[in-house]
Image (cartoon, grey):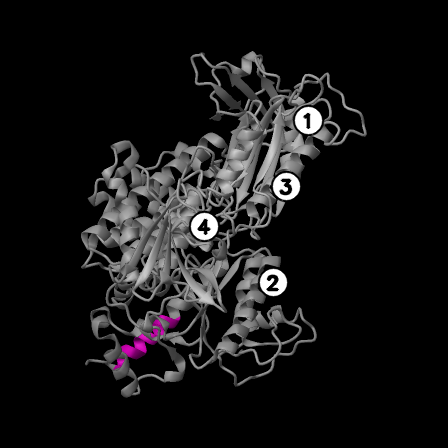
């Protein structure tokens, strides 16, 4: 095998020059705080000193191979006056690299720093845990500086072993392995430590990568202590594309412009399969051929050029235009304005844009993204989402054509698909969020809410306008949102950042009793009880059925004047004055309830109930969303907007709420399973069964007895009609979650049993299954992901993310437990890739 020593020396020298060029470029773009973090990453990993950020006590691994402290780093470290850099022979860390957009056209002043920390494979589990803690502390310190730095611990042998990992916040788990290495190789910037062997191996030797590297070391052409090897990439397995596409959609929730480019790249890769030409190989070939043009070797430009070539080949001009706009927006440059400093990034972007023939007006519109409001954001979000879905559908077709048996871990695909379902799948009750980091703020100082009654030209419901309530402003104005009920419209406006307590709200609803004061109070109540944004959903939450985390009930928002002439004494109690059947006329003071909740998957749902049975309908809907093993919501608030007796009404509704949640979630079997109500003089019962909650009007005591005996003695499930000795064990009943398909595997003496719970909590049992669980899971997922192909053209535009959930029933210490399938008996967390 030809390994010319002179050529190797030349490659090493050119590799140093390339890395120095990228370091210089990154430093020119970073802010002052970003530059400080960038320069201190290596020394904070190298030293483990009590005065420095990132210090971890005990025997925390530290020290970077071949590390030399730079003068700029010394100046930054002088901030900690008690720290004195000392030489150390420790070298638990082989290399530290930034990857992604750093030093590329895609880098902007607020770009994250994605740092790979390649450690010695000989570190034991405890040492790796300490190193993880050190990285987490440096991340926390960086956040205090206003910089997001994500650290990934990398075992240099893990890509060779292709070890499957579990999904964490910024970790793609088993969904992509080689594709991640492809991106790393073409974009990496070495901050400290060893160089990468991969750069010395010619592209046409990737198939014999291991042999070529062995020859380099055998001929002593390089010192092994100066190099780290993550392995070669001859080709990407077909199984990886589907999982990688899911992951990019997942990332697209928070970084839509970047996700469009990466999803299109995956689509172009799959289009070339099985003869895919990876960008890292194209990059390395250009570099080895002598290209020293920074733009020619720019990792983000390479992505755009590959995507552009593919879309032109497909005659997909709409997505080509979108890809260019996403590329430009990712840079955060404002090229419609005079540029103070003509740096490398400005020159590179202008060079690319000279071929795009953009009108100045388009550039101005893109540069005004900071001022974009609902119209622009909704249009951009719709375009981005449509592009992502088109790409995803094509990748599903690719998987079907190649009969892929997904190598992705079933738990990973479950977590990813549930996150996508929570973010993208629309249901009638869901409050849609339209601004995933597209624009900084959609706030409007003035809005007008207009109610359209039934029988008019426009659909009935509520409309939001961002204008004052004046004829001159309203004529010709386009509404921003339409919903069936007011509370959902207000929730949409609040969670999308359009309104807050300072917004001037106007109402035009001549056929309604709703008041401006009640609406403004609801916005204030929302603001006091729920944040506009939520913490990212944890992987552990996505491994379980969705639960209600925060709950709000708004009582009589649409009926603030209901029975306003009934003023109760200050000492009134539920026993002496029931708000549901008050006085001689037995009037029900609760005429409407609006329910809003946020789930553990960060979904926001809104429901409206009106009429004499509003409280019953609300409790049935609420408790049906709670499986028996669910936790009680972390926070529950009840707000009442009645003009008279709001406190007493709110207290009694809250007590009903607590009673019903307690009965639904009672796991002892000793609690009551029904609650009686008198609503406007009529007797009603709310009955709690294992898989359902239902209401029934009780005409007489015999009718009531018939229902409780029907439930307790007859043993019939009201919802399903199955007998009391139903096929499903109690633990399956307790985990049944409405709206989801769930598979529970239970090992038996002759194969295993499968309990299938459908969206309506109906259970089917399949006994003595002797096939492969893995093949069954993959087959079911393939069926659900491809089922849209059988639907109408209109429905086919949607993608089904609501994939089934899979669980195993295991026995430990004499009792049965439910674990997510594929979790291996535990749910692990890691910052590893």
Cα distance in 3D space between marks 1 and 4: 35 Å
- Find residue 675 and report its image quarter: top right
The Cα–Cα distance between marks 3 and 4, rounded to whole angstroms, is: 22 Å
Q: Which of 384 and 582 is in front in this view?
A: 582
| Spot occupied by residue 291 in the image (x, y as percentages of width and height) | 29, 63
| Vertical comparison of 65 with 747: above or below | below
Q: In which quarter of the image is the C terminus?
A: bottom left
Mark 2 vs mark 3, foreground winner is 3
Which element is circle 4 on? helix
Magenta extent = 5-16
Q: Using the rendered image of the protein, determine whether residue 387 is visible from the camera's viewpoint.
A: yes
Gap in angstroms between the C-alphas marked 2 and 3:
42 Å
Q: SS for tag 2?
A: helix
Helix, strand or loop at label 1? It is loop
Left or right: 292 in relation to 575: left
Which residue matches tag 1? 579
> Is 617 on the left or on the right of 555, as rendered?
left
Along the viewing direction, whichever of 783 and 148 lies nearer the viewer? 783
Mark 2: few, some, or many residues within 10 Å (few <14, many ≥20)? Answer: some
Q: At numbered mark 3, what does the secondary structure look like: helix, strand or loop?
A: helix
Residue at 45% from the left image edge and 52% from the top image edge: 343
Q: Residue 733 carries which label?
A: 4
Circle 2 or circle 4, nearest the eye: 4
Q: x, y percentage for residue 679?
A: 61, 25
Relative to the observer, which residue lies in front, 5 or 647? 647
Residue at left 32%, top 39%?
321
The secondary structure that dominates the magenta segment is helix
For label 3, the residue is 658
The mark that comes first in sequence, 3 or 1, is: 1
The disc at residue 141 is 2
């Amino acid at each position: 095998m030809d390994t010319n020593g002179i050529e190797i020396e030349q490659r090493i020298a050119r590799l140093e020059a390339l890395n120095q060029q990228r370091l210089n470029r990154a430093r020119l773009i970073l802010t002052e705080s970003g530059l400080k973090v960038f320069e201190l990453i290596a020394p904070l990993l190298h030293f483990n000193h009590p005065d420095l950020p990132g210090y971890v006590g005990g025997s925390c691994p530290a020290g970077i191979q071949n590390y030399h402290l730079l003068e700029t780093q010394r100046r930054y470290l002088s901030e900690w006056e008690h720290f004195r850099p000392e030489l150390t022979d420790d070298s638990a860390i082989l290399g530290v690299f930034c990857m992604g957009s750093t030093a590329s056209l895609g880098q902007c002043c607020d770009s994250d720093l994605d740092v790979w920390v390649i450690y010695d494979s000989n570190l034991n589990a405890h040492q790796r845990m300490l190193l993880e803690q050190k990285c987490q502390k440096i991340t926390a310190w960086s956040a205090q500086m206003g910089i997001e730095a994500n650290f990934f611990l990398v075992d240099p042998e893990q890509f060779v072993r292709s070890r499957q990992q579990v999904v964490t916040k910024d970790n793609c788990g088993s969904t992509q392995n080689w594709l991640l290495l492809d991106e790393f190789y073409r974009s990496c910037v070495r901050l400290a430590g060893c160089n990468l062997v991969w750069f010395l191996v010619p592209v046409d030797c990737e198939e014999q990568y291991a042999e070529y590297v062995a020859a380099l070391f055998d001929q002593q052409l390089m010192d092994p202590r100066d190099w780290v090897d993550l392995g070669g990439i001859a080709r990407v397995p077909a199984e990886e594309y589907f999982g990688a596409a899911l992951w990019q959609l997942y990332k697209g929730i928070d970084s839509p412009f970047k996700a469009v480019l990466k999803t299109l790249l995956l689509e172009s890769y799959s289009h070339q399969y099985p003869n895919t030409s990876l960008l890292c190989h194209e990059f390395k070939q250009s570099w080895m051929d002598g290209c020293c043009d920074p733009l020619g070797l720019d990792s983000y430009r390479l992505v755009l050029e590959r995507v552009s070539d593919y879309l032109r080949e497909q005659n997909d001009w709409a997505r080509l235009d979108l890809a260019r706009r996403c590329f430009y927006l990712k840079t955060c440059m404002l090229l419609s304005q005079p540029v103070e400093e003509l740096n490398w990034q400005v020159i590179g972007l202008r060079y690319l844009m000279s071929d795009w023939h953009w009108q100045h007006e388009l550039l101005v519109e893109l540069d005004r993204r900071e001022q974009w409001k609902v119209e622009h954001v909704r249009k951009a979000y719709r375009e981005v989402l449509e592009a992502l879905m088109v790409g995803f559908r094509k990748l599903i077709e690719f998987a079907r054509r190649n009969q892929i048996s997904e190598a992705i871990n079933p738990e990973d695909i479950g977590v990813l698909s549930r996150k996508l379902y929570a973010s993208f799948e629309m249901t009638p009750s869901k409050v849609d969020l339209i601004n995933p980091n597209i624009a900084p703020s959609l706030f409007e100082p003035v809005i007008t809410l207009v109610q359209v009654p039934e029988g008019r030209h426009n659909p009935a419901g509520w409309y939001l306008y961002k204008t004052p309530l004046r004829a001159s402003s309203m004529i010709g104005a386009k509404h921003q949102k339409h919903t069936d009920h007011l509370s959902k419209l207000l929730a949409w406006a609040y969670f999308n950042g359009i309104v807050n307590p300072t917004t001037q709200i106007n109402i035009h609803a001549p056929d309604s009793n709703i008041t401006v004061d009640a609406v403004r109070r609801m916005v204030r109540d929302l603001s006091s009880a729920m944040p506009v944004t939520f913490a990212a959903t944890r992987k552990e939450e996505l491994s379980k059925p969705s639960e209600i985390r925060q709950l709000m009930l708004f009582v009589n928002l649409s009926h603030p004047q209901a029975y306003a002439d009934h003023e109760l004494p200050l000492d009134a109690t539920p026993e002496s004055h029931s708000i549901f059947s008050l006085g001689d006329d037995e009037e029900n003071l609760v005429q409407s309830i609006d329910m809003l909740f946020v789930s553990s998957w960060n979904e926001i749902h809104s429901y409206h109930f009106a009429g004499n049975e509003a409280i019953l309908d609300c409790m049935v809907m609420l408790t049906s969303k709670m499986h028996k093993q669910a936790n009680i919501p972390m926070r529950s608030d009840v707000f009442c907007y009645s003009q008279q007796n709001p406190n007493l009404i709110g207290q009694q509704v809250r007590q009903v709420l607590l009673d019903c949640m307690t009965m639904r979630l009672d796991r002892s079997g000793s609690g009551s399973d029904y609650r009686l109500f008198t609503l406007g003089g009529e007797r009603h019962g709310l009955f709690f069964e294992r898989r359902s909650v239902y209401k029934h009007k009780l005409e007489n005591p015999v009718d009531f007895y018939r229902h409780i005996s029907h439930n307790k003695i007859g043993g019939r499930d009201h919802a399903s009609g199955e007998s009391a000795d139903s096929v499903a064990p109690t633990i399956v009943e307790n985990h049944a979650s409405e709206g989801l398909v769930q598979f529970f595997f239970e090992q038996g003496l002759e194969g295993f049993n499968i309990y299938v719970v459908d969206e309506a909590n109906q259970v089917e049992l399949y006994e003595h299954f002797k096939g492969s669980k893995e093949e069954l899971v993959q087959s079911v997922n393939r069926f659900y992901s491809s089922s849209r192909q059988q639907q109408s053209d209109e429905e086919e535009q949607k993608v089904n993310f609501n994939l089934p959930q899979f669980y195993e029933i295991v026995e430990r210490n004499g009792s049965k437990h439910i674990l997510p399938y594929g979790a291996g008996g535990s749910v692990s967390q890691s910052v590893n890739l």
